[in-house]
Amino acid sequence: MKKQNKKPAKKFKLSKKRELELKSRELIDGNSACAFAVKLCHVESIPAFPITPQTELMEKLALWISTGELDSYLNVMESEHSVLSAAVGSEMTGVRTFVSSGSQGLMLMHEILPIASGTRMPIVMICGSRALSAPIALWPDHNDFLSCRDFGWLMMAAEINQELLDFICIAYRVAESKNVLLPALIEMDGFILSETREPVEIPRQEIVDRFLPELKLETMLDVEKPMTLGTPVLEDYQNFKEQMQAAQNNALKEFEKAFKEWKILTGRKYDFVEKVWMENAEIAIVMMGANATIAKAAVRKMRSEGKKVGLVKLRILRPWPEKSIMQALKKCKKIAVVDQNISLGKNGIIYNEICETLKDEGKILSNYIAGLGGKHLSIQDFEQILADLEKSKKSEKKWLS
Amino acid sequence: MVELEQESRQKISGSLGQKPVQTIKDIDTEDYIKAGTFACSGCQPVLGIKLALKALGKNTIMVNSSGCMTLTATYPFTPYKIPWVHNAIENADSTASGIFMGLKRKGLEKKVNILVYAGDGATYDIGFQALSGMFDRFENVIHVCYNNEIFANTGYQRSAATPLFARTTTTPIEKKSRGNLIPRKHMAKIMMAHDSPYVATACTSYPLDFMKKVQKASTIYGPKYIELLAPCIPGWILSTEQGRKSGELSVQSGLWPLYELENGKFSVSMQPKMIPVKEALKMQGRYAHLNDEEIDEIQEMVNKEWESYNKGEFWTVHEY
């Protein structure tokens, strides 16, 4: 219930800092938000290849380079495979490199994904999510993004355009940390984010400069200090993978540090997971991506009806933030994992991971496959999921029809 | 913008401090690939690396495609005294593109050579798209294809560079087969059609010729293609010491023409003695099965090719 006696509206005076920040707010789509981040991070090398839905991102960067607004080198390659190969090559010379792709393009890059992480090149890549062919589709789901989860990349999923911009800055910071040195992949739901305008606050250049130091690689191609990179190994292979696992663990701490500093500099607070009404929630949805906005609306609606529901949105998938997830879902008795992806022959991929994390907790864990190929998800759909979950007495796996 | 591009196309990077090779005395005494690699004894492709790096000197970044030559730098050892990188088999040229991008950002694209050293499988077959793309983007890279006419690292399978009737493990000599029945693809001609400023062929048996060509390539801005015939001892079924001789016979019989195309202008760099191809073929175990008709067919092809070369024509039209 709203309070009856309204206070008279105070004449609100903005601080100068806040005023500046509001001025820097722009109504832009996801692709532009990424482009702004690329500019703010002083990316020097951008190998590119067009694929829907990230094409406008490279167009924007090309435009800025041609107007002199951005000082960088955009090179349109002949395939995505070559794009990531060139990204590895250019990162090896010690210049900051940015890549964006998605869907079929990401599939073509697959051979080079473990090479980029194995050679420890901190490339940042945007995955403009789009369902995988066949049948060929245009709208998003997360199978393309999640197919990259086992290669040692840092993985982040954005819900809104602001997160896209912030995540790129944070990703560079974490990826380039000396005790991490792994590439990062950021998920951007095709069309829902990439082509939809939202207000995005663009930080001032000096803020990002303070947050993100200049790239200094120790392992690189330099004629003054010759090194041999990408060598074959015989029985030492496992040692390298152990080192990468240790780097992933280090990334957890680095993310924490970066989140803290980003909050001080920009005022925007991030965590590994976003908890919505989770303080006393008994049933909850766990999901990632842009559709979480709709789920939040459903949760808010049900809360106003007095139901104890909540939502946990995953922001970071690799390294897997086990502790944060366990802590967020601690009090929850029933959990619905909504997967906008499917590991055919089994169930949703996030469901697998959540089940593994909560294996000893004795909770009801249900899986809902929904929104494949951009199938529309409404507030009612999420309400139905939560209502369904409330009734269920055991864990179930369902497809939302 | 157009003017800028033309300027960068014409500008010569200089030989980057390396002494121009005219005679044996001019050759750099420093080895940029040291001895003791995993390569077979008598390996000609390794000799190719040694010569190319001596020609280019220390201001060179080498990109290798997966193959025998990758194993020269098996962890934790490396024989290389220059920066060296291996990415995968089909993307040596796109990796080189990336390195070029980085060097350009640092203003070094004309001060550091990028040498791609890729096998024939990684050039003719799987790496062709990346190679073609790099030539299209006109990046300052030297692509040396060490051509041993097979996929050697996996055990001598047929590649698009395998010549007619050669025996490989995928074109065996049995009751119903006579070796490889597909004539090889003329890669140098395809690369010429990319408007490359410099295309040349060479052979490890003629080191001075090869080194001169590599040095010439390093002084021209743009994508350069040099094809190096490098006999494979086990693949061609030779004995260890026969590598040099078989290369020499291939050149002198006209089987492997040595030529240059500078800005599209064709010139033969070595007139062969035109000894019968039979002499060259009989040394190689992979041709041991050939009968007289098959040898004649190869001889005829070589004669026809040289007929046009001698007329100064680069393109030979084969009728099949």
Image (cartoon, rainbow, N blue to C red):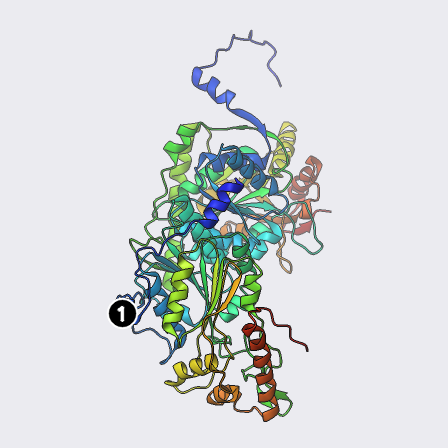
Q: How far across and how far down the image is residue B60, in percent?
A: 35, 58
Q: Nearer the viewer, residue B164 or A356?
A: B164
Residue A32, image quadrant = top right
Residue at 40% from the left image edge and 85% from the top image edge: B242
Q: How far across and how far down the image is residue A385, in percent?
A: 67, 42
Residue at 70% from the left image edge and 47% from the top image edge: A400
Kind of residue at disc 1: Lys
Inspect this view and state whether residue B208 appears. Answer: yes
Q: Quadrant of the C terminus of chain B?
A: bottom right
| Residue labelled with disc 1 | B25
Q: Nearer the viewer, residue A36 or A89?
A: A89
Q: Nearer the viewer, residue B274 or A69?
A: B274
Residue at 46% from the left image edge and 47% from the top image edge: B8
Residue sitting at the far front: B311
Q: Residues within 10 Å of mark 1 (few under 14, many from 20)?
A: few
Q: How far across and how far down the image is residue B136, in percent?
A: 55, 54
Is B277 situated above or below B145? below
Is B76 situated above or below A385? below
- Identify the subunit bearing mark 1: B
